[in-house]
Amino acid sequence: MIQKKYESAAKAIADLQDGATLLVGGFGGSGLPSHLVGALTKQGAKDLTVVSNNIGAVRDGVAALISNDQVRKIICSFPVGPHANELIQRIKDGSIELEIVPQGTLAERIRAGGAGVPAFYTPTAAHTELGEGKETRIFNEGLHLLEHAIKGDYAFIKAHRADRWGNLVYHKTQRNFNPVMATAAKTTIAEVDEIVEVGEIDPETIVTPSVYVHRLVKLEAKSDGRVLLHE
């Protein structure tokens, strides 16, 4: 019987190794797999390349990994925020490499990775500093940049509901970078609010098919309404 549920976040991410490329879903706090990221700060893997739309707050999201000296390179669209001073200092001292990617280009690079497309041309960022040093070509009389696909060793994503096979349904704006990142990683780990039996989810509502999801961790509700993940 296919069963992808892990009893704890710690066990679900235990084999993530130093030097891995990690895709982290979410847009701001919406759809952020914060419990999986929190477990990784305790697990301690280092020299990570992290791909995320934005970095998050000091103690949450990718910023927590940066503060914990676990990140070697960050690929993102929005590195600014209350955590920016620390990140800037780490960039200056050479401990972290930052690659800024326009948001649409970032999404497409990840989608291409999941679709098996090695690279594509886009006019976005042409004639700007972000385009410097990149291969170019003229299409329809306009300059286009060659952008390479992004793939991950792992993806941390957040969804609302899953069945035990790993078919996923998202809640409103959770459906941002999570579905596309699920397709582009060797191992996709989803933290979810609920896990149900196969057949209990309307197939028409499934956004991420189970073939892309390898591990599930269920969030447990506390009596005061807060949510926790068993360590």
Image: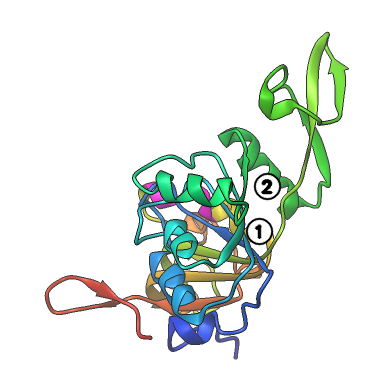
Image label count: 2
Tag 1–tag 2 contact (CB < 8 Å)? yes
Which is more toward the observer, 164 or 112? 112
Percent position (x, y) of residue 136? Answer: 85, 24
Q: Quadrant of residue 59?
A: bottom left
Relative to 72, is 7 on the left or the right?
left
Q: Dividing the image into 4 quarters, which one contains the N terminus?
A: bottom right
**Few, some or many residues within 10 Å of mark 1 (<14, 14–19, 20+):** many
The circle drawn on residue 46 is none
Residue at disc 2, secondary structure? helix
Percent position (x, y) of residue 28? Answer: 39, 47
Residue type highlighted by circle 2: Arg
Percent position (x, y) of residue 34? Answer: 39, 65
The answer to whether residue 82 is above or below residue 4 is above
Residue 176 visible at all: no
Which residue in the structure is indicated by mark 1?
183
Residue at disc 1, secondary structure? helix
Which is more toward the observer, 209 or 94? 94
Q: Which residue appears at 35% of the width and 85% of the height?
A: 230
Q: Quadrant of residue 120?
A: top right
Residue type highlighted by circle 1: Thr
| Magenta region | 173-178
The circle drawn on residue 111 is 2
